[in-house]
Image (cartoon, grey):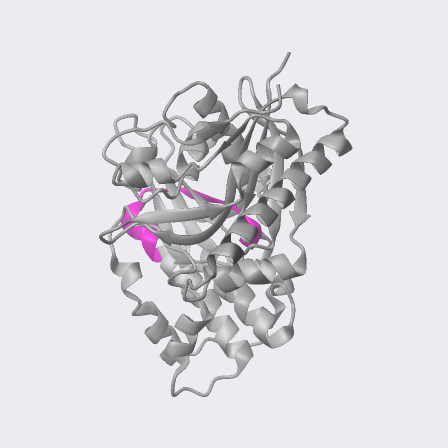
């Protein structure tokens, strides 16, 4: 019987939980998927914590941990019901949880994902693997990005240099060098959709910029773009990772100080910021790459995709859908795969070369299901 795994993640944008049902017999296979939206009030509180000053009452933090776990469990149960599967048919569930703070540098480095895995295991009855990032941080790494190891397992092809670009709230790249003696590399390049979504919500009261129409109606403001590009993060060499702790609306407001710019032009400038920083990262660290395969929600923004393609020309930039892979569920599949690696008590291959950890570590805690 084919072993089945579930992978669940809510990313930087916190717009909902991606759920993937996957198997990994000869190659990774996505068997079913769904998006489970957060209740609006829960999403509001998650975003307030993730991009605020971090102040929250302990009781409120504990309640948020429980509420997120309940939604993750509900997301898993809904998919199983739709696919007419029992919990006992799932070998394990890999839950990334919801990142609310990521501080891998400094005197007390940490990363925090909410969504109590004890409760997920209890509510689903499925063995749950969670808390993937903190062991890597404990070993001196950034705990992110974790997807490159799965990208390599899924997409490495002979000696062809290529890049996998994930356009979530934050953009990250995986560099598949092709040569066997080259280590796997990858890192967060900076913002992808997080600022675009936040600015759209602020000015249009929409969850995101549908088809990039808001950005397309404006033009790039060179003064603002120059200010945004001065962010020190962009010049930091990898390994590196980032999130809403750096790239949020107050950060943008600081760079807008003293400028009078139409909102649509700010949106157009944010697209340019993402495209330029992504292209600079690829040209600097993966200059031999022949093609860039794109996954994540940003793949559906044609204005952003065009800007990236123009910035990287003549390198081919295309959706990973052209390879027969659903671009919306690659990250969820990553955590299903990481759950399998944890059950085998194996370090996810080459993660430490991406994150900067001292050596490979088995990632994730295991929380048994209802036997």
The residue lying toward the viewer, choosing from 289 and 33, is 33
Q: Is residue 272 left or right of residue 86?
A: left
Residue in the picture at 26% in, 50% down: 108
Q: Which residues are magenta?
A: 280-299
In the rendered image, residue 355, in percent from the top left (x then y), is placed at 31, 41
* The N terminus - image quarter: top right
Q: Is residue 38 above or below residue 47?
A: above
The number of numbered discs placed on residues in the rendered structure image is: 0
Residue in the picture at 56% in, 61% down: 45
Q: Is residue 51 above or below residue 166?
A: below
The residue lying toward the viewer, choosing from 350 and 182, is 350
Pick out the residue farthest to the top: 1
Res. 157 image quadrant: top left
In the rendered image, residue 238, in percent from the top left (x then y), is placed at 27, 48
* The C terminus - image quarter: top right
Does the image show residue 330? no
Residue in the picture at 38% in, 77% down: 254
Does the image show residue 116? yes
In the rendered image, residue 267, in percent from the top left (x then y), is placed at 52, 72
In the rendered image, residue 80, in percent from the top left (x then y), is placed at 71, 31
Q: Is residue 18 left or right of residue 80?
A: left
Q: Is residue 358 left or right of residue 39?
A: left
Q: Is residue 124 above or below residue 275?
A: above
Is 368 inside the magenta-drawn segment?
no
Is 289 inside the magenta-drawn segment?
yes
């Amino acid at each position: 019987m084919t072993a089945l795994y579930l992978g669940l993640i809510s990313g930087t944008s916190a717009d909902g939980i991606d759920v993937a049902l996957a198997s990994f017999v000869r190659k990774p296979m996505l068997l079913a998927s769904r998006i489970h939206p957060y209740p609006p009030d829960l999403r509001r509180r998650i975003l307030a914590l993730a991009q605020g000053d971090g102040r929250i009452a302990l009781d409120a933090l504990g309640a948020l941990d429980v509420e997120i776990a309940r939604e993750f469990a509900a997301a898993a149960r809904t998919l199983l019901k739709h696919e007419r599967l029992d919990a006992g048919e799932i070998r394990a569930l890999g839950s990334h949880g919801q990142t609310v703070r990521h501080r891998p540098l400094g005197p007390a480095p940490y990363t925090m994902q909410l969504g109590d895995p004890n409760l997920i295991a209890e509510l689903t009855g499925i063995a749950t693997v969670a808390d993937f990032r903190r062991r890597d941080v404990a070993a001196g790494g950034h705990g992110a990005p974790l997807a490159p190891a799965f990208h390599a397992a899924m997409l490495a092809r002979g000696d062809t240099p290529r890049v996998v670009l994930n356009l979530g709230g934050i953009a990250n790249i995986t560099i598949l060098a092709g040569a066997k003696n080259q280590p796997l590399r990858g890192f967060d390049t900076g913002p992808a959709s997080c600022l675009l979504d936040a600015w759209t919500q602020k000015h249009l009261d929409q969850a995101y910029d549908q088809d990039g129409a808001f950005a397309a109606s404006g033009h790039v403001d060179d003064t603002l773009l120059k200010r945004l590009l001065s962010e020190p993060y962009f010049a930091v060499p990898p390994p590196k990772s980032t999130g809403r702790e750096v790239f949020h609306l107050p950060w943008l407001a600081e760079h807008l100080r003293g400028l009078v710019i139409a909102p649509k032009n700010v949106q157009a400038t944010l697209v340019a910021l993402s495209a330029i920083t992504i292209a600079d990262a690829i040209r600097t660290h993966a200059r031999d790459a022949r093609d860039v395969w794109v996954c994540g929600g940003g793949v559906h923004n044609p204005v952003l995709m065009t800007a990236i393609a123009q910035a990287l020309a003549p390198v081919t930039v295309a959706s990973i859908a052209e390879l027969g892979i659903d671009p919306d569920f690659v990250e969820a599949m990553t955590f299903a795969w990481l759950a399998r690696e944890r059950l085998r008590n194996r370090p996810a291959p080459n993660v430490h070369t991406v994150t900067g950890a001292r050596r490979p570590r088995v990632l994730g805690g295991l929380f048994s299901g209802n036997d």
